[in-house]
Image: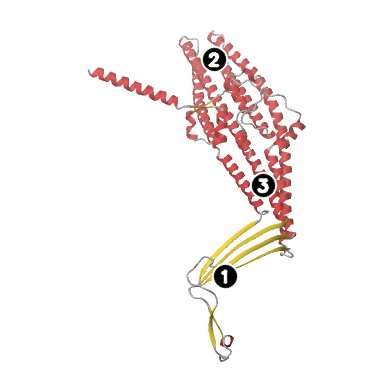
Amino acid sequence: MKLRTAGVVLLAAGGAASALGAQEVAVRERLSLGRALEVALAESRVLRDARLGLSVADQQVREAWANVMPSVRASASYQRNLRVQQAFLPAFIFDPDAPPDELVPVRFGSDNTWQAGLTLEQPLFEYGVFIGVGAAARYRSLEAERVRGAVHDLVTSVRLAYLEALLRMEEVRLTEQSVERVRRTLEETRALNRAGLASDYDVLRLEVQLANLEPNLVRARNGVLAAKRALLATIGRDPRDADRVELEGSLNRLDITAVASNGPEERGLLRYAGLDGEGGAAWQDPEAVSSEALEARSRVQQARLAVELERARLKAQWAEYFPKITLFSSYNITAQENGAPEFFGSARQRASFAFAGLRVELPVFLGFSRDARVQQAKATLAQAEARLQQAEFETVREVRDLVELVDESRRRVESQRQAVAQARRGYEIASAEYRSGLGSQLQITDAEVALRQSEFNYSQAVYDYLVARVRLEAALGRVEADRGSIVLGGSSP
């Protein structure tokens, strides 16, 4: 009976463990580059901050237009005099027979006083106001371009972080394969040693090689977690979920020369990484590429819009020398009443008046403050123009460097693919010769190291090519989160 009970408990425990294992597998999340971009565009705090800045600029434009429109103000007041003010006047004013030094008290005012008014002002000519409207519109354009630039920077950062994580995953995969190959060779060498066909030194050499590889594997796995945490932080997710996230795509399986031959995951990776359907068509000549970057790159556009904004601000400072012409008018009504308050009393107790006029203001001398502000605006404009020129120079330099880097890394991918095939063939030959007793353990060790290094060099070359392409896309202002489906429309105002 006890055995049966124990068996039931073990089965239940085993079932619970299986359920927990299934649950652990179920909570793992597969994250593609496309999904990472979607999350980043929706959750990024940096992008949210840029969009809020654009909202502020929109309201500043409305505020600038308010200075052009008429202003209407209404006012009303009621005053209850608890004790009406009195003044003493000579009595002979009211009684010619009164002594000349006699004074009588006279009330001035009433118990209740009402006042209401309506005032209108309309600027007819105020040069600074119209310049301010234009400056606000330029500032709004600058903020819109900053949002676009923030989207481009975010997409580029997500792409680079994702590719970095894939490279670290490739390092883990290759290190695991090396560990497995060395372990297999070690077992074969131990068997040969027992048969007297291999020396103790051969066994010891492989054991040392394995002992060196295993810590590298731990370091590589930690590198994957660190890269995943960096990716999750970039897209606005909790970095603590790094161990539950699995990334799609593999650098080792990528074929950048024939995109259609890749698997679905790799095609999606290339698509969201910015490669076109032709797998990297030849770039235009350097002059055309540089011109495109100068027209489309957000950093240059921001610098150009900043120059326009500073020019508008300089004009606004010059506007302080112009006169201001304003039309104004007012209508007022007053009423007084004694006794209990009655709102505005009767028609006999009310009075009204109205006026209209034209006001001209011309600042004559303000202590040289206007000239100082003009000179400040000129200096600020010169700074903005210098920053624009520097941004253009840096863009041309960066684009040309990246075009050359893309071509170099693409050629390196092609040569490394051949090197991997040759190294794999060399390892197979060395393994076969070693098992047949014709080769040495040193040969197979060298072949394994050459294969591992060539495979990693291929992944590194693919990574370098993709990174160069991503950065070139950003430098050219061609950044797209998806070639058609994900809209960077978050960047649009």
State if disc 1 and disc 3 touch (CB < 8 Å): no
Residue occupying the far top of the picture: 436
* Residue labelled with disc 2: 441
The residue indicated by pointer 3 is: 139
Give x and y (percent) for residue 81: 50, 72
Question: In the figure, 16 relative to 152: above or below?
Answer: above
Of residue 320 and residue 112, the one placed in the foreground of this image is 112
The quarter of the rendered structure image containing the N terminus is top left
Disc 1 to disc 2, how far (Cα)? 123 Å
- How many numbered marks have been drawn onto this rendered protein structure? 3
Disc 3 residue type?
A: Tyr
Asked if the residue under mark 3 is in contact with the one under mark 2, i.e. CB atoms within 8 Å, the reply is: no
Q: Which type of secondary structure does the marked residue at label 1 adopt?
A: helix
Seen from the viewer's position, the closer of residues 144 and 343 is 343
Q: Which residue is mark 1?
A: 348
**Residue 143 position within the rendered picture, expressed as x and y whole percent measured from the top left:** 64, 44
Q: Secondary structure at mark 2?
A: helix
Quick one: quadrant of the C terminus? top right
- Please state the horizontal and vertical placement of residue 291, each as a whole percent of the image: 75, 35
Q: Is residue 388 left or right of residue 151?
A: right
User: Mark 3 to mark 1: distance in Å?
Assistant: 57 Å
**Towards the viewer: 202 or 229:** 229
In which quadrant of the rendered view does residue 443 lie? top right
Picture residue at 41% right of the left edge, 25% below the top: 23
Q: Residues within 10 Å of mark 1 (few under 14, many from 20)?
A: few
Mark 2 or 3: in front is 3
Mark found first going from the N terminus, 1 or 2: 1
> In the figure, is residue 5 to the left or right of 246?
left
* Vertical arrangement, residue 254 with respect to residue 146, above or below: above
User: Residue 245's x, y, as percent?
Assistant: 50, 28
Q: Earlier in the sequence, mark 3 or mark 1?
A: 3
